[in-house]
Amino acid sequence: MKKTITPEPTDKPQKAVVESAKENTSSAGAQRRKALLFQLSVGIMLIAFGILTFLVVTIPVFSIDLSITQGLQSITNPIFAGLMTFISWAGFSPQSFILCAVIVMLLFIFGYYWEGTASFIVAVIVPILNLLAKTLIGRARPSVDLVHIVNQLNDFSFPSGHVMHYTAFFGFLCFLSFTLLKPSLIRTLYLVVFGSHVVLIGISRIYLGDHWASDALGAYLFGGLCLIASILFYRWGKTRFFLNQPTAAAKSK
């Protein structure tokens, strides 16, 4: 009579369970660290903007602002001057409204309805927030007796409307380009074009004498907070609205 061989118990299933638990725990821990880092970053930006606003209200002109403006305006290269003028020109009305409207319409035409809706909301809300901040803070623009001013503007200075708008709107377009499009030359081109506008607009506003460097810094901080809020709003609505719209990944196949 043959003996029945009973397979020896193995601990592989137990090991698999343990490893899976470790991975889930590690993933949860990583998510908590990311969430904490995100909250810390937002907190730092809020505190920095609050401190800068307090200083702007109490000190009319910073010596470092004047030094930065004079240093930039010492650049006499005509190509640099033309680039700075063009970057700012695109942020004035009516061309700014036209540009935003065209981009939003293109998003709708290509089927990105939620992206177009979110971009439209950013383009409308951010200038309103900027106007409220400028009115409440009431900082005067640079004067002609201190720096060279290309075009004299009569509204308030802090935070810069151009910089805040570019940071939030073009920054949001950078986010959409990076997340929706596959790695390609066209995605790289979008990121360079939109990103360069965000980077150069602060330099442009200082160079043209319309704003102090602290105006640009405050706008980058406030605009960055608006950009974060826009991305959170977009992700919140992405899972609730326009679920049947085509995706970039599907179109690029």
Image (cartoon, rainbow, N blue to C red):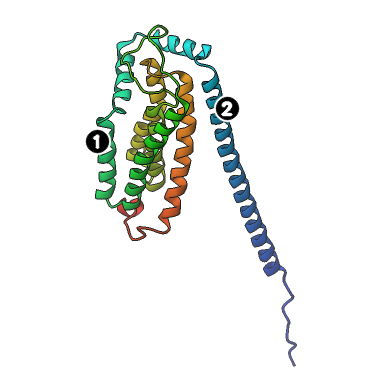
The secondary structure type at the circle numbered 1 is helix
Q: Is 139 displayed left or right of 123 in the figure?
A: right
| Residue, far bottom | 1
Mark with earlier residue (2, 1): 2
Q: CA distance from mark 2 to mark 1?
A: 35 Å
Picture coordinates of residue 26, whole percent (x, y): 65, 53
Q: Which residue is mark 1?
A: 98
Q: Position of residue 149 (x, y in %)?
A: 35, 12
Task: Compare residues 72 and 143 and report the one nearer the observer.
Answer: 143
Specify the label residue 244 is tagged with.
Answer: none
In the rendered view, does 112 fall on the left or right side of 131? Answer: left
Residue at (35% x, 8% y) in the render: 76
Task: Evaluate whether residue 253 shows in this view.
Answer: no
Quarter of the rendering occupied by the N terminus: bottom right
Tell whether 46 sits left or right of 109.
Answer: right
Query: What percent of the width, then of the height, locates residue 105?
Result: 25, 45
Query: Dot 1: few (<14), some (14–19), or many (≥20) neighbours within 10 Å?
Result: few
Residue at image point 34% right, 37% down: 190
Query: Which amino acid type is shown beneath numbered disc 2?
Result: Ile
Please give the name of the residue rendered at 57% of the width and 27% of the height, measured from the top-left corner.
51
Which of the two residues, 248 or 80, is positioned nearer the viewer here?
80
Q: Quadrant of residue 184?
A: top left
Q: Please identify, in this view, whether the residue under mark 2 or under mark 1 is nearer the observer.
A: 2
Mark linked to residue 51: 2
Residue 99 position, x and y percent, is 27, 35
